[in-house]
Image (cartoon, rainbow, N blue to C red):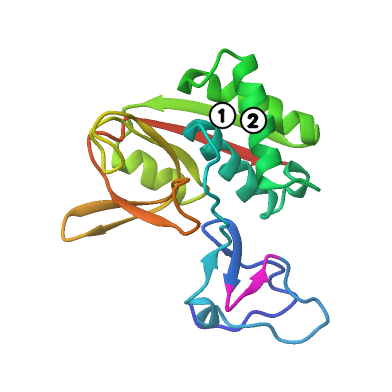
Amino acid sequence: MSETLKTDEAKRVYVNAMPAVLNGTIYSELNMSGETLKSFDAFTGAELMYDPHEQGGNCIVGAISNLMWHWSINGYSNLANGMTFEGVEAEIDRLINSHGGYANDNIPATIKDYVKSKDNSYSVTVTNKWNPSFTNVKSEVGSRPCLLGFAAGSPYSDKEGHMTVCVGTREVNGVQYCKVMDGWSTSISEKKWGSYNDFMSKVKLSK
C-alpha cells in the first residue's frame, strides 16, 4: 500500500499488531499535530520493539520475564514500572515456585498472578499447548509473541529442554525457522524448527 496516511485516517502504525520501530523511532502513537504522516511505504523496514535479556537462572523464569518485559515496553508499562529485568525475574521466580516449581504446567498461573499483581485493569489469558505445529506457532506470532519450548535434542542441548519466547517465523526452500528471545543472547536468535519444539504457551494481554 503506497497511499499516504493522514491524521484523520490513522493514529497508530503497527507491525504484527505491535508498535513499530523504524530507524530507532517508535511509531505506536503517531503525531497528531495535523501534518501528513508517513506513507505505508516508509515503514517497509519497520521492526517490532524487542529488548531481549539473558536469563539469570532457570530458562522458564527467563522466558516469562522476557515476555513480560516485552509487553511492558509495548503498551503495558506497569508490568515492569520502576523495575530492572533482574527484579522481574526475581518476582517470576518466586511466583512459579509458589505454584509448584519450574514446570510448564505452572506457567499459566504464574503469568496470571504476575500480571494481576502489577495492574488489575490488565486482562490476560494463557493457554498451554503441547506438540504444536509450525502453523500453530506461525499463526500466533502473527499477532503476538508466545513461549516456545525446545525439548532435549534441539540446537540448545542434547540432554535438556529449553524455554524461549518466539517472536517470528520464516520459511526458506521448505526449511522452517523460529525467531526467538532465548535467554542466551541480547539479540533475536534464529533456530530451525523441529520435532523437539514440543510446547507453546499462548499469552494474550488486553486492557
| Amino acid type assigned to the residue bearing label 1 in the image | Val
Amino acid identity at mark 2: Ile
x and y percent of residue 153 in the render? Answer: 23, 34
Q: Quick check: is 201 in the magenta stretch?
A: no
Residue behind mark 1: 126
Q: Nearer the viewer, mark 2 or mark 1?
A: 2
**Furthest residue in direction bottom, as rendered:** 35
Q: How many marks?
A: 2
Q: Secondary structure at mark 1?
A: strand
Q: Nearer the viewer, residue 98 or 198?
A: 98
Magenta-span inclusion, residue 24: yes
Determine the residue positioned at 39% across, 55% down. 189
Q: Disc 2 or 1, which lies upstream in sequence?
A: 2
The x, y position of residue 97, in whole percent, is 60, 18
Which span is picked out in magenta? 22-28
Left or right? Give the position of 91 relative to 139: right
Q: Quadrant of residue 203?
A: top right
Q: Circle 2 — which element?
A: helix
Residue 92 circle label: 2
Q: Answer yes or no: do the residues labelled 2 and 1 have beta carbons within 8 Å?
A: no
Locate the C terminus by quadrant: top right
In the displayed structure, would residue 103 be above or below residue 69?
A: above
Label 2: how many Cα within 10 Å (few below 14, some 14–19, many 20+)? many
Q: Residue at x 31, y 28 (%)?
A: 131
Would you say 191 lies left or right of 79 here? left
Residue situated furthest right in the rendering = 33
- Would you say 127 lies left or right of 90 here? left
Work out whether residue 17 or residue 99 is closer to the camera in this orientation and state it.
Answer: 99
Image coords of residue 60 (percent x, y): 50, 32
Residue drawn at (47%, 35%), measured in percent from left and top? Answer: 59
Which one is nearer the viewer's eye here, 79 or 58? 58
Q: Quadrant of residue 48?
A: bottom right
